[in-house]
Amino acid sequence: MSVSKKPLIIIISILLVLATAGGMYAVLSNKPTKTDTATESNPSTPAPVTPPKPTTLSCVESLPNDVLIGQKIMPALFASQVNTLKAPFAETKVGGVIIMDEISASDITAFKQGFAITPNIATDQEGGTVQRYKSAGIMPGATDIASSQTPQQAYTTYLSDAKYLESIGITTNFAPVVDVASAEPNPLPGRMYSSDTKVVSEYAGQFIQATQKANVTPVVKHFPGLGTTTTNTDNGSATTAPLASLKTKDILPYQSLAKYNSDAMISNAIVPDLTNGQPAIWSPEAVALLRSQGYSNSVIYTDSLTANAIPGTISDAALKTWQAGVDVALIVQRKQDVNNIHSILQTTIANAQVALTNGQLDKTKVAESVLRILQRKNVDPCAIAQ
């Protein structure tokens, strides 16, 4: 008897349909098949998340406010007061000092050891009437150098002196003077090279290159120029020629010398059409003009806030300079003010911290300023932040 194949075919078809449906169900329900077993029991380990590396600016911003402000202050240091002032200067975390008379290399080395951040050691070593270190010989002033030495001879003179400064621990020299002589009487007699901008640029260039060769940072001064004034701002208020006139003469040396990447000092003089009747150190426009001449990365210093051209308290004067964008406030107190300088620094720093809190000082701009200062000192802000 023959058996019909239809029931068998139907049964096979039903089994295939059921098998297919079961597979689809396993996929839809995310049930692992046999081939998934190894993966399920040994899931892959996710790659560790590497935290972003802090930027140098973010490291500066993380520093305490008193450290930030302290780095932006430079008081004076006298040989007879090294031991007296070491503790208060280290406590207030000042970024540097300006040496006003001869301090030995050993005393400078000992002085620096009291600081968490190595201080900048600066001085005024122009030559002539402004020369703090004379033991290695008297150096002619700018006027005499330009009239008696060739540019190459001037370079040799400046290099010898700069090497001496470096050997005793000086890191910054507030020179050369690049003011262009014009007015009579000259407010800085003997301290200006010439009334010719090319001569000024040539000899100042030799000074800068020699100083940098000795690993000392030069500071060109006094922007935008004191040559058209008749009064030394140390003695009283002074006003320059209008800005339009300065652009045709006094500012030219700054433009030609910018390629050397020196630091710079802004003057205490009033500049018509630029500083709104205020000293240039309080003028954002004056600071912006200097930066635009090729000094965008330079550390910019005030002239001394103790000058008679600067009214009011030192604390207020310093705050105004920082609001204008100046990096470092130079406070050249008199030797007899040794008992007052600690209090002056404490008040200045306290007031500036309040200004940071209430927005009178922009924290980011302050951090950018301190970054310039630390970079010039070859200090890694991220190492400090740790």
Image: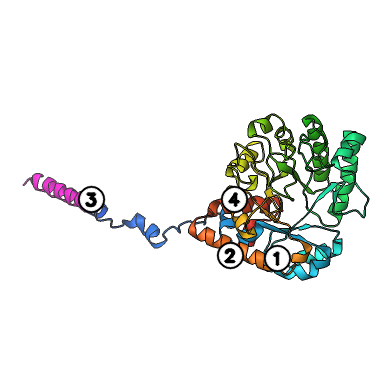
Horizontal and vertical percent position of residue 325: 60, 48
Give the residue pinned by disc 3: 24
Q: Residues within 10 Å of mark 4 (few under 14, many from 20)?
A: some
Identify the residue at image location x=86%, y=59%: 102
Horizontal and vertical percent position of residue 166: 84, 53
Give the residue pinned by disc 4: 368
The image quarter in which residue 114 lies:
bottom right
163 lies above or below 386: above
> Sequence-wise, which precedes: disc 3 or disc 1?
3
Give the residue pinned by disc 1: 341
Circle 3 or circle 2, nearest the eye: 2
> Sequence-wise, which precedes: disc 3 or disc 2?
3
Label 1 residue SS: helix
Q: Verify whether residue 20 appears in magenta.
A: yes
Q: Give, as a single range, the part of the protein colored magenta.
A: 1-24
> Sequence-wise, which precedes: disc 2 or disc 1?
1
Amino acid beneath label 1: Ile
Horizontal and vertical percent position of residue 155: 87, 39
Q: Residue furthest left?
A: 1
Amino acid beneath label 2: Ala
Give the numbered dot on residue 350: 2
Identify the residue at image location x=58%, y=44%: 284
Amino acid beneath label 3: Met
Label 4 residue SS: helix
Label 2 residue SS: helix
Note whether residue 64 is visible.
Answer: no
Circle 2 or circle 4, nearest the eye: 2
> Sequence-wise, which precedes: disc 4 or disc 1?
1
